[in-house]
Image: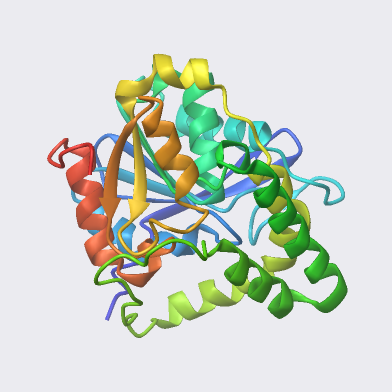
């Protein structure tokens, strides 16, 4: 039986300093799904398959991850560079200046915000799910110290220790957990998804050493985002509203920048329940969800 989550076509795009691998499914206006953390295009297999009935759904491996190879040595990655990578993909896949939607989660939500601030004329809707912007926290120094500690823990003791440090640090000890919160049972992964998880696990050292601190320390162009506020939706997980990763996005909407929409699950809701997450994203893109959750 054919794998319904497999892409209809794949390609590679040469960009300054790297070659990007991308996948495309469906037909219609372009919807670009940008993976965050150590993830690659495989993160969105199930979601993309469910959205390809209405959109041309594209996903890609960020430079330096999985199948997107760098031309030179690995170094700290920059938000602006990955933002321009996404813009070049948009220009390739939507050359007729048609409406383009972008979804980014976690570190790629930061890229989505930068992309909107730089190229608002090319974007119809941008959904940024829990961008971990430490400079927007009530106590930015706490966020800076946390992510620096995660990187130091990785350097000293490895990936497992770094992830434990991050998990402990992201929880606000004074916050009340959301009612009904908790982890959802994940569907059994297909062979394709299992291979994707192996690739993404192999990307963890790159994320922890070269992405985490440089991305979380990014300072958004608030004036540019304010001018594009009608195009911006900030996503927050119904199970993660009290985590430090969710607070910066909420504070953006407190400044009347973007509308707030609650998504199923937590910070990684797109993996926890991709069906429900895709349904909510569909509603947001079609303006069927009330903004201001």
Q: Indicate the position of residue 77 as horizontal and vertical percent values.
A: 74, 44
Relative side of 282 to 86, left or right: left
Q: Nearer the viewer, residue 151 or 145?
A: 145
Q: What is the tally of numbered marks visible in this picture?
A: 0
The quadrant in which the C terminus is found is top left
Q: Is residue 259 left or right of residue 107?
A: left
| Depth order, front residue of 216/97 | 216
Q: Residue at x 71, y 71 (%)?
A: 162
Q: What's the residue at 42%, 18% (across, down)?
A: 226
Snapshot quadrant of residue 93: top left
Image quarter in which the N terminus is found: bottom left
**Residue 54 appears in the figure:** no
Q: Quadrant of residue 40?
A: bottom right
- Give the vertical position of 90 relative to 9 (above or below): above
Please state the horizontal and vertical placement of residue 147, each as a whole percent of the image: 70, 56
Residue nearest the observer in this picture, 237 or 205: 237
In the drawing, does residue 125 fall left or right of residue 149? left
Residue 182 percent coordinates (x, y): 34, 76
In the rendered structure, the answer to whether residue 50 lies left or right of residue 198 reads left
**Residue found 41% across the figure and 53% down from its top:** 9
Q: Choose between 186 and 196: the one closer to the eye.
A: 186
Q: Position of residue 160 (x, y in %)?
A: 69, 79
Question: In the image, is residue 218 above or below residue 269?
Answer: above
Say which quarter of the image contains residue 124: top left
């Amino acid at each position: 039986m054919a794998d319904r989550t497999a892409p209809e076509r794949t390609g590679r795009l040469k960009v300054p300093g790297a070659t990007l691998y991308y996948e495309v499914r469906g037909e219609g206006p372009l919807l670009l799904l940008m993976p965050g953390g150590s993830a690659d295009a495989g993160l969105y297999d199930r979601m993309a398959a469910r959205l390809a009935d209405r959109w041309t759904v594209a996903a890609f491996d960020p430079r330096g991850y999985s199948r997107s190879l760098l031309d030179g040595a690995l170094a700290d990655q920059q938000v602006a560079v990955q933002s321009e990578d996404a813009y070049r993909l948009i220009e390739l896949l939507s050359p007729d200046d048609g409406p383009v939607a972008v979804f980014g989660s976690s570190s790629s939500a930061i890229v989505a915000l930068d992309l909107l601030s730089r190229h608002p004329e090319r974007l119809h809707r941008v959904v940024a799910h829990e961008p971990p912007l430490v400079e927007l926290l009530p106590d930015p120094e706490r966020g800076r110290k946390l992510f620096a500690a995660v990187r130091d823990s990785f350097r000293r003791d490895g990936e497992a220790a770094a992830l434990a440090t991050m998990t402990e640090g992201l929880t606000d000890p004074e916050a009340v957990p959301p009612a009904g919160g908790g982890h959802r049972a994940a569907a059994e992964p297909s062979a394709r998804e299992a291979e994707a998880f192996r690739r993404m696990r192999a990307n963890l050292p790159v994320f922890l050493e070269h992405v985490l601190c440089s991305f979380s320390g990014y300072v958004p162009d608030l004036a540019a985002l304010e001018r594009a506020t009608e195009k911006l939706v900030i996503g927050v997980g119904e199970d993660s509203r009290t985590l430090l990763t969710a607070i910066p996005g909420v504070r953006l909407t407190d400044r009347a920048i973007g509308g707030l929409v609650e998504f199923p699950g937590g910070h990684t809701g797109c993996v926890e329940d991709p069906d429900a997450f895709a349904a909510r994203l569909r509603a947001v893109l079609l303006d069927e969800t009330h903004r201001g959750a």
